[in-house]
Amino acid sequence: MSSKPTVTPYGAGKSKKEEVGAMFDSIASTYDLLNRGTSLGVDTLWRKKMIAQLDPQSHKRILDVATGTADVAIQTAKRMPVEQITGIDLSNEMLRYGRKKVTKAGLDDTILLKQGDSENLPLETNSFDAVTVSFGVRNFENLEEGLAEMLRVLRPGGKLVVLEFSKIRFAPVRALFNFYFGRIMPLIGRLQSKDPRAYAYLFESVQAFPSGKEFTDILDGVGYKQSACQPLTLGIASIYTAYKPS
């Protein structure tokens, strides 16, 4: 099991799962703006690169874990001839905004959004060709359990694609990013959000999360194969890929 410290949004004595669900319920209306802000708008390019890891010919049934407001699900459906995308998220408020976006995009027949726990997926074993997670795995209460559940629902040979912030190794970029992410974003949060603590948590959770080889080693330990890491934008974020053994 991971020895990383547990970082929670509020430190209120509840489980991380409960606090994360409550946090995203509280910031759902400003979440998309938050994503643009924390990445300086580059997250849209990162998501395109993430979706490009999927194979239009073999990845027809896709699960998007921690789907939030369904950004990845919608963009995937627009770019690939998928049969079905299922989005799972803890937060009903995030899903409420996501369903509005799905309907606006005319994708109600393609994308199904469901409330659910990433560490106990209400889904059948071997039922998806690919699983995607965008900026969600660091919010899992138990990382290994969440990764194992995604492995379970993947079909043999199925692919996992994870997009997540990373700990930056190049010192000048790390200093600038940490100042912006750790100081400026919480200030913006106090001005525009009814839950400014959520903005501070996002920075803290990135610092505590295993990245690079540390994360691919965890994937290997859970049972994935061919785990790989592709750093993005000077290492600010990374795309991780891995497969379920055939």
Image: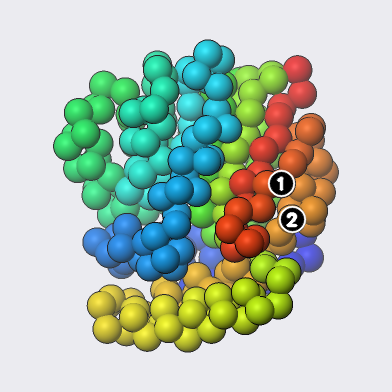
Tell me the distance, in whole angstroms, between the alpha carbons under discs 2 and 1.
Answer: 6 Å
Left or right position of 124 against 185: right
The residue shown at (45%, 57%) is 42
Q: Check disc 1 and give the amino acid type.
A: Cys
Is 114 above or below relative to 2?
above
Q: Which mark is residue 212?
A: 2
| Coordinates of residue 226 in the picture (x, y in percent) | 78, 33
Q: Which mark is residue 16?
A: none
Q: Check disc 2 and give the amino acid type.
A: Gly
Left or right position of 1 against 179: right
The residue shown at (41%, 23%) is 80
Q: Mark 2 or mark 1: which comes first in sequence?
A: 2
Q: How is the image coloured?
A: rainbow
Q: In the rendered view of the protein, which quadrant contains the N terminus?
A: bottom right
Q: Residues within 10 Å of mark 2 (few under 14, many from 20)?
A: some
**Which residue is label 1 attached to?**
229
Dot 2: element: loop
| Coordinates of residue 184 in the picture (x, y in percent) | 43, 83
Is 4 above or below relative to 232?
below
Question: Which residue of the protein is positioned furthest toward the left in this rendering?
Answer: 104
Q: How many labels were placed on the picture?
A: 2
The residue shown at (71%, 59%) is 211
Residues at discs 2 and 1 in contact (Cβ within 8 Å): yes
Q: Is residue 4 visible?
A: yes
Q: Is residue 7 visible?
A: no
Quick one: 191 or 66, which is closer to the camera? 191
Dot 1: element: strand
Quick one: 39 or 32, which is closer to the camera? 39
Left or right position of 179 against 105: right
Q: Residues within 10 Å of mark 1 (few under 14, many from 20)?
A: some
Left or right position of 160 against 39: right
